[in-house]
Image: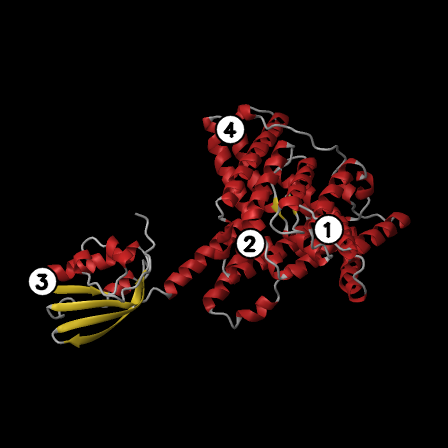
Amino acid sequence: MINLRNYTAANIKNDLLSGIVVAVALVPEAIAFSFIAGVSPLVGLYAAFILGLVTSLIGGKPGMISGATGAVAVVFVGLGLAVAKMYPSLGKEELSIMILHYILIVTVFAGIFQILVGVLKLGKFIRLVPQPAMFGFVNGLAIVIAMAQLKFFKPSDYDRLNSFKEVLIHSWNENYLMYILVAITMAIMYFLPKYTKTVPAALVAIITLTLAIYITGAETKTVADLADIKGHFPHFVMPDLSLLSTKSLKIIIPYAVLVGLVGLIESLLTLSVLDEMSQTRGSGNKECIAQGCGNIASGCFGGMAGCAMIGQSIINFSSGGLGRLSSFTAAILLILFVVSISDLIGIIPVAVLVGIMFMVSIGTFEFSSISRIKYMPKADAFVLIMVTIITVMFDLAVAVIAGIIISALVFAWQHAKIYARTHMEKNTKVYELEGPLFFGSVTSFNEQFDIKNDPDKVIIDFKNARVMDISGVEAIDAITRKYKEAGKTLLLRHLSKDCKNLLKDAGPFCTYAEDDPTYKVAANL
């Protein structure tokens, strides 16, 4: 919760001003993501308000901004298609209402799933995302943020244009003022902080350029051109639970889990990025619970699911909003915009918000990672590049999961070697193993032994090796059987007690010593 006793006058001012900037920046994003999901803009705006309010109070990172996001909205596109296929006889308007009910139900179920993840303390597994994958995620997201702004420059006759050059010419002729406003906004955000940080540069750009356009009457796209955001305070709207059936649950549960996972991945990665920027550590499990509570509340008050927003979170951070008051202010102001001053917000030029997001994109991109690539191991560089590409081409969740899988496979390949030094002790051949024995190194393990030419007595010494999983245990059992079938005596030295307990065929051939290791074997038995 917000503890004002910990605030100074300067902190309160910074959080309030930063909250104003973020609230304005949330409007076009919420509208755009609502369109992607195929619902009314108010559904996205309500989600940004409710989710932002809940996470501002109980979230795992003060100042982190949550709301409707593109990653989650894209999942709802698939849900809409599945619902349309399920109800082929419904008219367009009836189908839209049906899809909305399914979105609200999925949002509630996703929230329950996220709370379970937090209660079970599974948020810590975000640590499995390797640093190259983090760089790739951040760089890819920066590119996605920048690319998402390009639609605002699309000329009205875009479909009739045949080349990129024609698109540029028509876009300039139609939107030249937008280009100029974007450039001025970016200049204000770049240069103003060099002279003063008393007022957020983004807020100065919004107020100054909005007044300039309003006074001069210049023609340019405004927030009002995107959609009518006039509405009322959200009220309790229980999702239509009569839709729940065995057939519908086959759609709802998978999409709820997918929404929950996508939301948590983006939220926890955003938390990690802000942790690095602020040099403080947030609570991943607490954020999981807050996201879940926020999504349940959103679904029960007519809002779609959402998650943490890295762009707006960075705007908040760079504008001086470091406390919970900043995200709380942004949420409250957003709903006031919808209810009371939608006409005033409607006159803000879209170009100003685009310029702000371009600067966010530049600030988000990890430029140092480019210079580091040539010094990185090739495997890490490959992961970084692949995660960046997948983030841009597909979505964040796919990119992060792919990054983890690629990194795990690379790690397994690099460590899939186990070596043996041999020497004779009287008439006994001793294999001294070095390296991990797991699924990736089983083949290498088997290649070390010369069963046919070995003497009648053999010792395999695991003092400098470690059995990592059940595949390693099975490999030891298998090699024991081969020596037994060859009529030779085998002893296994320096295995942990846990490993000995898992061995079936090789157990009786283990020797016991005081210096046996104590490691555990990762096995699902």
Q: Amino acid at mark 2?
A: Thr
Distance from disc 3 to disc 2, alpha carbons, whole Å, reads 57 Å
Give the image location of residue 144, x and y in percent: 62, 53
Residue receiving disc 2: 391
Q: Which residue is mark 4?
A: 86
Instruction: Identify the amino acid type marked 4.
Output: Met
- Label 1 close to label 3 by CB (< 8 Å): no
**Residue 339 in view (yes/no):** yes
Q: Which mark is residue 5?
A: 1
- In whole angstroms, how far apart are the C-alphas of marks 1 and 4? 54 Å
* Residue 166 visible somewhere in the drawing: no
Q: Position of residue 18 (x, y in %)?
A: 75, 52
State left or right for residue 300 relative to residue 181.
left
- Please determine whether, in this image, residue 249 is positioned above or below residue 51: above
Tag 4 or tag 1, which sits nearer the N-term? Answer: 1
Judge left or right: residue 334 versus residue 494. right
Question: Residue at (20%, 76%) from the top-left corner?
Answer: 423
Q: Position of residue 297 (x, y in %)?
A: 62, 35
Which mark, by number, is residue 241? none
Crowd tier of the residue under label 2, counting other residues whose Cα lies within 10 Å: few below 14, some 14–19, many 20 or above: many
Kind of residue at disc 3: Gly
